Image (cartoon, rainbow, N blue to C red):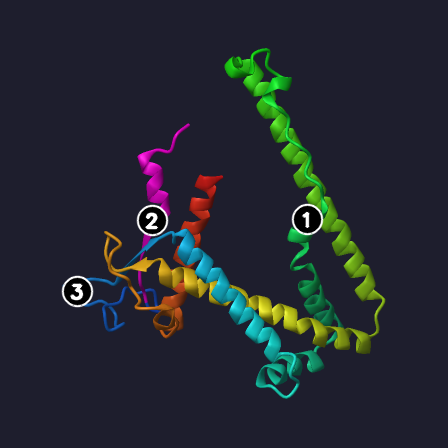
Amino acid sequence: MGLKIADLLKWRDSVTLKNDDGEEINEQGLPLQQGEEPITVYLRIIGDDDLAVSYRMARVASQRKRESLTKQDSLDWEEASKPIVEANREQLIALINQARTSNLEPEARSGVTRPELPEIEEFAVDPDAASLAEQEAYQSAVEKVDEDYEKAVREYIEVREAVIKDELSNLSDDELKALALDEIGTILAMGEFYAELFDQKAARGSYLDKTYKIRAFDNVEDFKSATSGIKQQIIEAYLALEQRADGLKN
């Protein structure tokens, strides 16, 4: 079935900005007064070029954070290590587990071989003019392959999670603390990656007009300088829009 015109709306959205009390705000960030127009940001999914740049900048930010955390005289290291030194056993295990399981899904999808999908020729006498029943049988077979693959991925992840849990349970508190200090770089670098990625996407996908010609921010740094409340509203709206668009593409 082809794309409907109405589906294109799923690539666009808008968010009316509010303050911490849930009141719509004006251009000065103050509660809306009678006769004033609220500030509305119009959002649309960014294109491939902006997306590529967004991921590149996120990787740069992640690498910078990771490199800083290798220097034990850095402010990043001091701030990161302090809570670990004071953490109890359960907190240390939770932190290490978070770091070690964060990439399990891509690891699973790389490690689990995806079976080849069936061909229509296996179900249709004439593949170029397959009957509805033959098409349904073919589609069911395709879905079964996909379901089996997803099940194998989940099982892979569950086994790896169990192995990690068992390994950590056998370590002493001192060993856990040393391991947590090694793993904190992974967690903080990943956090930096996603923070930068969300900033890049939201800034590049924000406009002040319904025709999507006037950028809401001159650049990403301009977006970053906005108040945290405004930034968060725009980021959440953009990510929700992106999720709907992903559903449309899939």
Circles 2 and 1, Cβ within 8 Å, touching? The answer is no
Helix, strand or loop for disc 3:
loop
Helix, strand or loop for disc 2:
strand
The residue indicated by pointer 2 is 12
Q: Residues within 10 Å of mark 3 (few under 14, many from 20)?
A: few
Circles 2 and 3, Cβ within 8 Å, touching? The answer is no
Q: Amino acid at mark 2?
A: Arg
Q: How many numbered marks are there?
A: 3
> Percent from the top left, x then y, of residue 33?
19, 68
The part of the chain drawn in magenta is: 1-18
The residue indicated by pointer 1 is 110
Distance Cα–Cα, label 2 vs label 3: 25 Å
- Indicate which disc, 2 or 3, sits on the residue closer to the N terminus: 2
Q: Amino acid at mark 1?
A: Ser
The residue indicated by pointer 3 is 36
> Percent from the top left, x then y, of residue 128?
52, 16
In the rendered image, which quarter is residue 145 located in? top right
In the rendered image, which quarter is residue 76 located in? bottom right
| Residue at 48 percent of width and 63 percent of height | 197
- Say which of marks 2 and 3 sits in front: 2
